[in-house]
Image (cartoon, rainbow, N blue to C red):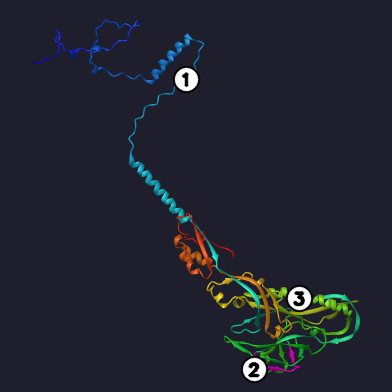
Amino acid sequence: MPRRVQDIVPGDRRGIRDVPVEKSKKPSADGVRSAKKTKPSAAKERSFDEREPAREIPVHKQTSKLEALDRAAGEKEPAMKKPKTTLMPPTPARRPRKRRKLPWLIAAGGAVVVIVAAAFVASTYFSQATFTIVPRVVPVNVNSTYIAQGTPATGSLSYDLVPVTGTASSTVIAVDGPQTSTKAQGKVTLYNAYSSQAQRLIAGTRMANDSGLVYRLTSSVVIPGYTTKSGSTVPGSITATIQADQPGPSYNITGASNVSDFKMVAFKGTPRYSSVYARIAGSISGGFVGTKKTVNPSTLASTTAQLKAQLAGYLQAKAQAAVPNGDIMYPGAYAAVYSSPVVSDSGTNSATISVTGTLYGVAFKQDDLVAKLASNQAVSSFSPYGYTAPGLDQLVFSIANATDFNPPKKTALIMKLKGDFKMVGVIPVTELKKKLAGVPLADTQAVLKPYYGSVIESGSGELVPAWAKVPKDTSRITVNVEKP
């Protein structure tokens, strides 16, 4: 028979569940727990579950209690002094906030938008593009003899004349000589614009300028007929010597003088009077009447040589300055003609020796010369942008037929040229900037491609910032052309 278990109920009918539980007491000083039981108070009789929770003592009250203990300890031990501690008021406890993801996402998105906007502004308004261009270079070596004609001809090299005139003088010791009378003499260029047929003038033909001074041809000449080019008439011409009709210094004319054309006296009243004429081609000098000074022959010879050398340097510089744009004239590319020395009275026991010279500079059109030295194919390969020819003016030049070369008659010139120069493509910088503006860096090679093989050898570009396009503003595009 199973055992039956039930609660033992005391006489006052209370179960074991109704008995209150007391807290254990601390042991006494002798270690024996007091067996005396006290009657529980009304507070103790309350069940464990109904007790009030322990109250938390505020921090400032705990601090006051500690200070009281410290004062008590200080009275007992006056020798021990503790530093005064300043207590901060308690910081109220903060409730933990629940994190929200939405504001963080908004802030992150806003930052991305700001960064993208800043990058756009930087790439649009502050970007810079720099391109480095290597021009196409064709080296040319020259070491040969070439022929240049005095008149232009298809397929041949021709030269242009740059005539300049000057006079140099020097005073030397002299003595009075005999009474003399001489006529002025000089060079003129005769022109035939009257007919395509040649015009012959005999020796002694008279010609006069607007001043009424009359001069005569010293020898017979034949002036070539005129030619027509592109609808324009080009008069035939030839150089001749004239002499004053009368002696005297009034017939002397320097090259710097303002002198009108000379007209043939015999043609006056006919159409040939205005179409067959002469122009001064140098100084006309030597006219004198009176007592000439006599200069020692050796002094005259040495002074004349010095004057010619001095005059040559002056005339070369003058001719070089007169070379037309697009032409080139080498040092030594000239022929000079000097007059006989003229001795004039300059005072007691002194005389002035004067020498007049005319220098005919020989110039070549650079494009024609390069085409002759390199080839027409090399020149056309740089089309349509063109080229420069650094070093072309440094070639060593010399005239091989100096004895037979006569510039006034425009005879053929045989010359020797030696040295090296380069043909360098001309980069159209302004045009490139306009075509590159606003183009992505990856497409810039397509822009440069049409220039390859003509004037550009290679090219590269750099952008700042790297992700930007080439600026549309050409002022922020730099094109650097490397020197060959």
Counting residues from the N terminus, which is met first, the one under dot 2 or under dot 3?
2
Separation of disc 3 and disc 1 at Cα?
A: 109 Å
- Marks 3 and 1 in Cβ contact (< 8 Å): no
User: In the rendered image, which residue does mark 1 sit on?
Assistant: 85
**Secondary structure under the numbered disc 3 in the rendered image:** helix
- Relative side of 119 to 478, left or right: left
Is residue 28 covered in magenta? Answer: no
Q: Which element type, helix, strand or loop, lies under badge 1?
A: loop
Please name which of the two marks, 2 or 3, marks the residue nearer to the observer: 3
Give the amino acid at mark 2: Gln
Crowd class of label 1 (few under 14; some 14 to 19; many from 20; radius 10 Å): few
Indicate which disc residue 144 carries: none
> Magenta region, mostly helix, strand or loop?
loop
Q: Which of labels 3 and 1 is toward the front?
A: 3
What's drawn in magenta, residue-wise? 193-208
**Tally of numbered tags:** 3
In the image, residue 141 sits, relative to residue 23, either above or below, namely below
- Amino acid type for the residue under numbered disc 3: Ala
Instruction: Give the x, y percent position of residue 407.
Output: 70, 83
Kindly state the secondary structure of the residue where label 2 is placed.
loop
Q: Is residue 416 left or right of residue 464?
A: right
Going by the image, does 49 lie left or right of 6? right
Front one among 7 and 241: 7
Q: Which residue is mark 3?
A: 312
Q: Give the residue at mark 2.
A: 197
Distance, label 2 to label 3, CA atoms, is 38 Å
